[in-house]
């Protein structure tokens, strides 16, 4: 999918390929340095290797039950969205969602475009009826984006995330019935 950003740059949203592994890993490592809203620390992201990243991408490409889309601007991967269908038969109707966008590309509508593409995929998925995920309670912009897509809070885990500054943040559980 092709879009124009407010700054005039072109955004491409496309499925990941195994050869994207180096760029996707670099993007994720950079993103963990820019925000504390992700679960991995920069050190944990740095410890990830290319072989495991290729395997990660391949696990999506080999399985139509899962989704991995990349956001690309100027030939550079700047974000991604994932959905993994539960592997448990009794929970096959659940898809767990994740999203990340590099800080330099925040507030350009990339998250919204990734969400739109993800929701289109989820609605067409033969088994998934609910998309769910966790978000840090202090990630107000993301929470507003999710609410704009009609996701609702269904639970909260107090002090679930320990931040580098020694503070704790609640984890909000959100979901949406997609069909």
Image: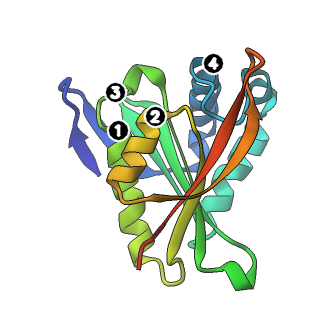
User: What residue would you read off at disc 2?
Assistant: 140
Q: Residue at horizontal 63%, vertical 18%?
A: 33
For residue 22, what is the image quadrant? Answer: top right
**Colouring used for the render:** rainbow
| Lower sequence index among marks 2 and 4 | 4
User: What residue would you read off at disc 1?
Assistant: 110
- Drawn side of residue 165 relative to residue 139, left or right: right
Q: Determine whether label 2 and label 1 are within 8 Å by CB.
A: no
Q: Nearer the viewer, mark 3 or mark 4?
A: 4
The spot of residue 16 in percent (x, y) is: 52, 50
How far apart marks 1 and 4 lie (CA) works out to: 19 Å
User: What residue would you read off at disc 3?
Assistant: 74
Q: Residue at horizontal 63%, vertical 34%?
A: 38
Q: Determine whether label 3 and label 1 are within 8 Å by CB.
A: no
Quadrant the C terminus occupies = bottom left
Mark 2 neighbour class, 10 Å CA radius: few under 14, some 14 to 19, many 20 or more: few
- Drawn side of residue 73 relative to residue 100, left or right: left
Q: Which mark is residue 33?
A: 4
How far apart marks 3 and 1 lie (CA) works out to: 14 Å
């Amino acid at each position: 999918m092709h879009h124009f950003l407010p700054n005039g740059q072109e955004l491409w949203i496309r499925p990941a390929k195994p050869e994207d592994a180096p760029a996707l890993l670099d993007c994720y490592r950079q993103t963990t340095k820019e925000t504390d809203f992700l679960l991995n620390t920069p050190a944990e992201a740095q410890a990830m290797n290319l072989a495991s990243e290729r395997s990660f991408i391949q696990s999506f490409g080999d399985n139509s039950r899962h989704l991995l889309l990349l956001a690309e601007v100027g030939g550079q991967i700047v974000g991604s969205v994932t959905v993994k269908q539960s592997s448990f038969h009794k929970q096959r109707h659940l898809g767990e969602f994740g999203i990340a966008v590099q800080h330099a590309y925040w507030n350009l509508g990339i998250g919204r475009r990734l969400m739109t593409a993800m929701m289109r995929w989820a609605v067409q998925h033969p088994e998934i009826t609910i998309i769910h995920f966790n978000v840090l309670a202090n990630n107000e912009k993301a929470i507003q984006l999710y609410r704009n897509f009609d996701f609702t809070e269904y639970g909260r885990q107090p002090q679930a995330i320990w931040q580098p500054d020694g503070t704790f943040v609640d984890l909000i559980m959100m979901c949406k019935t997609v069909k």
